[in-house]
Each structure stands twice: as C-alpha cells, then as structure tokens.
C-alpha cells in the first residue's frame, strides 16, 4: 500500500538542504518511503523523484524512466531505488537537454549534462551496484543527484532565455 505524497516546490528550504547518507541497509523504515516515492512520481508523470522532494532529507532517489505526456521519448525501465548514489566517472562529453522538475512546476530549462557517467549506488537490500548510464537515464541520475545536494535545475540553466514555460516547451518539443 502506497501513498501519494505532497511534493515540495521551489522556495521550500528543504529542497536546498544537503541530504544525509543512509548509514545502514537494509532498513525497513525506508520501504514505505520508497513505495510512496514511486507512486508519487508515477501519479505526477515524473521520470524520477528524490527523497527531499517529499520532505525527507536522505540520500535516496528513484529513477523511473518511461514515456509520459511530460517526456514522450523517454526509454522504459522499472522504477529503481538508488541509495547513497555517486558519480564515479564522467564522459566529459556535455550535451544540452530540456529538463523539468516536479518541484519546479510549469517550467523547462536547457541544461548541460554529461552524456555518459559511471555511477554507483546501493539497492534497498544493501547490494552495491556499479553501472554506466547514458543519455536520458544519465540525465535523470544527474538531475536527481543534484536534489540530494540542494541544487535545482534552474541553477544550471546558463542562459536566462533557456528557461521557458512548459506550454512553450511543448510547442518546440512536438513540431
Ligand atoms: Zn527534480
């Protein structure tokens, strides 16, 4: 049984905190949070969500890429909980892409991210996963990792003209 939680929005100080490491796994107290994060992202057509977005300052996020009205070209994967995630290597090849955020409603911004990254994280059961992520999923990981450090995507938009409304974005995304 999961609950759709209220999503914190830009301006809420919780989104600017540095989240704390989860010291021990498995931790059954995380089970409900993980299920709720997955349900909350799905209900809001999100492709990822980080614990601080539901006011929990822990180093945990969900990557749940799938096509949706908000991201029509997203690849499909099972929602994956990533705990104490880190980037261990970056391709150095930066690519621009439009991002949105459930905590920044109605806006999109053009953000440069590494196209490929090597990452590590723990599963809820405590297994260490090391993998390479590319393209859209790598972008989600970098966006969600920023949430754990109190960074929101508008902070990374370098040109003021590259921050636009969601409805303007939909015009350029579907022509
Ligand atoms: Zn976000």
Image (tube, helix red, strand yellow):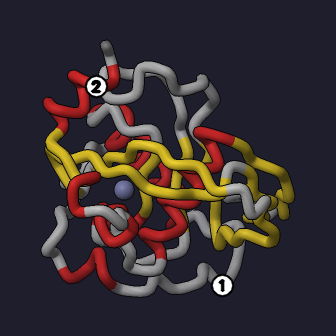
Q: Which quadrant is the N terminus positioned in?
A: top left
Q: CA distance from mark 1 to mark 2?
A: 44 Å
Dot 1 alpha-carbon crowd within 10 angstroms: few under 14, some 14 to 19, many 20 or more = few
From the viewer's perspective, tell me whether residue 165 is left or right of residue 75. left
Q: Which residue is mark 2?
A: 172
Residue 27 horizontal side relative to residue 169, left or right: right
Please count the marks in the image.
2
Q: Earlier in the sequence, mark 1 or mark 2?
A: 1
Q: Secondary structure at mark 1?
A: loop
Label 1 vs label 2, nearer the camera:
2
Give how far across and how far down residue 70 sits, in percent. 32, 28
The image shows residue 16, relative to residue 159, as above or below, that is below
Residue, disc 1: 23
Between 144 and 100, the residue placed more toward the observer is: 100
Pinpoint residue 29: horizontal percent, then vertical percent. Answer: 51, 67
Q: Which quarter of the frame holds ligand 1? A: bottom left
Residue 24 vs 74, above or below: the answer is below
């Amino acid at each position: 049984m999961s609950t759709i939680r209220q999503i914190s929005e830009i301006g809420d100080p919780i989104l600017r905190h540095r989240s704390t490491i989860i010291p021990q796994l498995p931790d059954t107290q995380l089970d409900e949070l993980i299920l709720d994060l997955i349900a909350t992202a799905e209900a809001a057509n999100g492709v990822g969500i980080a614990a601080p977005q539901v006011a929990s300052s822990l180093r945990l996020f969900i990557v749940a890429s799938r096509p949706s009205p908000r991201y029509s070209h997203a690849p499909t994967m099972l929602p994956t909980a990533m705990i104490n995630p880190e980037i261990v290597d970056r391709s150095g090849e930066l690519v621009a892409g439009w991002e949105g955020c459930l905590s920044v409603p109605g806006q999109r911004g053009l953000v440069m991210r590494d196209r490929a990254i090597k990452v590590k994280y723990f599963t809820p059961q405590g297994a260490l996963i090391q993998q390479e992520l590319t393209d859209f999923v790598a972008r989600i990981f970098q966006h969600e990792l920023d949430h754990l450090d109190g960074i929101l995507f508008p902070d990374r938009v370098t040109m003021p003209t590259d921050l636009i409304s969601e409805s303007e974005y939909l015009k350029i995304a579907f022509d």
